[in-house]
Amino acid sequence: MLTHTHIMLPRLRRLGAAALLAASAGCTEFLTVPNPTVIDAATINPVSDAPTLANSAQQNFATSFGLWSMYGAWFTGESVVAETFPTRNEFALRGIVPQNGSLNADVWAPLSTAIATARTVMGLALPTPATNPQRLQAAFIAAYSFELMAESFCQGTVSLGPQTPGPKLTVQNMLDSAIANFTIAITIGQAINTASSLSYANAALVGRARANLQRGNTAAAVTDANAVPAGFVFNLNYVDDLANRGRLANTFWQFTRDRGSISVDTAWRHSVGGVTTADPRVPWQDGATMTPSLSAQDANAGTFYVQLKFNGYGVPVRLASKLEADYIVAEASQNINTIATFINTRRTAFARPAYVAPATLATAIRDLMTEKGFDFFLEGHRMGDMQRNGVAAIAGMPVTGNTYLKSGFPAIGSQTCFPVPFAETSTNPNFP
């Protein structure tokens, strides 16, 4: 039976080209995953092994999603890098070099692992593929992994086979792969027609709407968004396993409580987009006033403002929801009055000041993205929002040329996406 609750499984090591089997439904791309070994496709039993592989793919994705969201929060100004690692400060500086070890180890490699395990399952000779729950689960994970890469990385690459590096992929290529895999998940989930499978299908509808909005296919995005049932929420769940917190726990709390790495940025504590009263959707507390007290790893980061939205190792993170679908519909309308009405609906729900429709669409979009920033604080939406609407639409975004809050670092750079790591491109002749 399908479940989107957390599953504690031993981590599968990264899969090599031999494990990347051709997927069905016309989507055969695979992200290059170095360090081949461990799983030989010929040894996999598609009946007995598929559930374990599918569950492991989902856990790989849950792990990668937390890390990806955290680094995106640093990049887009939701949180301050309250620790000393230069590689992590590069994200807040918007000046990431391809040789950045955290870029590879914490962002690219985990997403590559998630998609590799998911695509391995999709390539198996699974029984009743049109209604196979493991194929549904794997397509879902592959789709979201492609989506996150498309929203954050400047380019991508896929392996064409054993020892055959793939070409550079554009953001559009990756979005197309996400859409294709979301379509598989929707089709299978609706065909199985159980509560669990429909939950995956509805989350895939949200994901496909997100990908189509990113791709510029607004009509398709609205159709999918409107098909999501009212009140729908799909969470990635985590647990507090002391021996495996790096893999199984909520990343935001782990890096808050254990490392002192994440401090809520000034903009989200005080004023964003003209809203000057602290918003209840972004709960925080000065770490010095907590029991036990918490402090930043790097004293140069200033006061440690602890995020309390995810205040435990086992707190879930929302991946897809009807609320996100509603935001997609509002943005896709490109209508000032429609956007203003929706913003007021959200503000009313939290007793915030009324919103007055602005004179320009650009201002309305910026204000919509700000409201979305409150609703989805630290949930991994701002990278994609920035790619669609530009840096100027993202309130609190580190401003190019400004002095960094810590001494000894250069001024804020101008990057708007993550480079593909040198560890990935150095062995691929298609990346000069």
Image: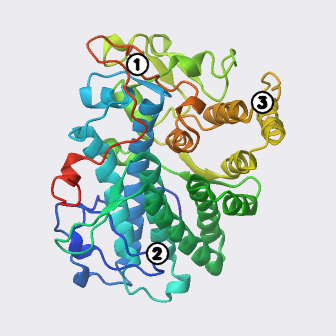
Tag 3 residue:
347
Give the SS element for disc 1.
loop
Q: Nearer the viewer, residue 74 or 173?
A: 173
Give the SS element for disc 2.
helix
Question: Closer to the camera: disc 1 or disc 3?
Answer: 1
Q: Is residue 35 left or right of residue 394?
A: left
Question: Closer to the camera: disc 2 or disc 3?
Answer: 3
The disc at residue 134 is 2
Q: Position of residue 312 (x, y in %)?
A: 48, 35
What is the spatial separation of the Cα atoms under label 1 and label 3, in whole angstroms? 33 Å
Q: Say which amino acid is labelled 1.
A: Gly
Tag 1 residue:
401
Q: Say which amino acid is labelled 3.
A: Arg
Q: Earlier in the sequence, mark 2 or mark 1?
A: 2
Q: Nearer the viewer, residue 102 or 180?
A: 180
- Residue at the spot 34% in from the left edge and 73% down from the top edge: 120
